[in-house]
Amino acid sequence: MLHLPMSVGNGFIKLVPIEPGLLLTIHRYSLQEETIVERLAEENQAERWLISFQSFDSKLTAAAHLSTAQLASTTLTFRTVLPAHTPIFFVGVVVEKAQLAHWLGIHQAAPIGLLTHPQPRLVEALLTPEIQSTLQAITTLRPVDELDLLFYRIKLQELLYWLLRELGQRSIRNVQPLHSTDVATIFQVRVTLLSALDSPPSLAQLAQLAGMGQTKLKQLFYQVFGNSPYAYFQAARLQEARRLLDQWSVSEVGHQLGFTNLGHFAHLFKRQFGLTPKRYQAAKRLKEIH
């Protein structure tokens, strides 16, 4: 286990070689400065997947740092931004495709076609409550135990179950070839989307930023994130609303995020989280009292 030096941050990184072809890394820390981690493409590693789960304390981070899970070909280069002064719970997994296929008990097909698709792939999903809960358990520092490998194997399979269940709901039609430049472009589009949650840019503006046609942009964005740019923007907007409701009134949050109609804001919030903003605040206060 590696403990971070105080000049870098506070926390630890732990490597768990569960079995041949399966490596787990556990990260739990807070960094002194925002850090960009670049994962370089590996040549001749087409038979492996890199799967990562990163969760940030929602009370301390804005929508620019959403908690997400990624499943990517190791032949792609991509970057991850880790914010400063924020508790980070991060799990990385490198797994051979054959091992994952064995767990799933399939050979010719797989959820969302990931295991057998010939093109390099990268898909990302927002963390579900089930993934968040499992991630908390797996990143909690625990005493050394002779059953550690069994514990981590079970928790890892649980993470993969919830992730593949979430990703399996997506359509895989019209899959476009994906290159590292496409990944960088699509993630820059996402940064632009999340930079001003009170005013979404138009699809034409995003396409101009990406240097591609609107149709290709929509296809690649959906392929990676599982949503259209506007639907993704709206989901992130509501995630940010939930965070801000811990500090501000419903009307103030609605105003900050550009909702001119508070009734529409309440309707969208309830559709995504199951409670109106006012009921959400009341439930949070009741939970804090108890």
Image (cartoon, rainbow, N blue to C red):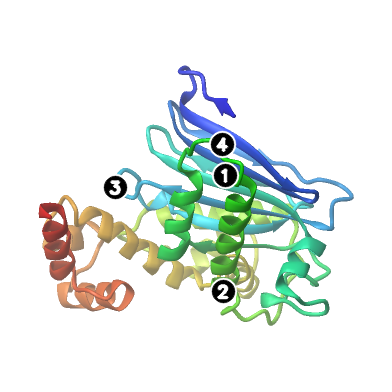
Say if residue 279 shows up in the picture.
Answer: yes
- CB atoms at circles 2 and 3 under 8 Å apart? no
Task: Name the residue type under label 1.
Answer: Thr
What is the quadrant of the C terminus in the image?
bottom left
Task: Name the residue type under label 3.
Answer: Lys
Mark sitting on residue 165: 2
> Residue at label 1?
80
CA–CA distance in space, label 2 to label 4: 29 Å
Q: Earlier in the sequence, mark 4 or mark 3?
A: 4
Q: Nearer the viewer, mark 2 or mark 1?
A: 2
The one nearer the camera, 211 or 284, is: 284
CA–CA distance in space, label 4 to label 1: 6 Å
Q: Earlier in the sequence, mark 2 or mark 3?
A: 3
CA–CA distance in space, label 2 to label 3: 27 Å
Q: Earlier in the sequence, mark 1 or mark 3?
A: 3
Q: Earlier in the sequence, mark 2 or mark 1?
A: 1
> Residue at label 3?
59
Task: Name the residue type under label 2.
Answer: Arg
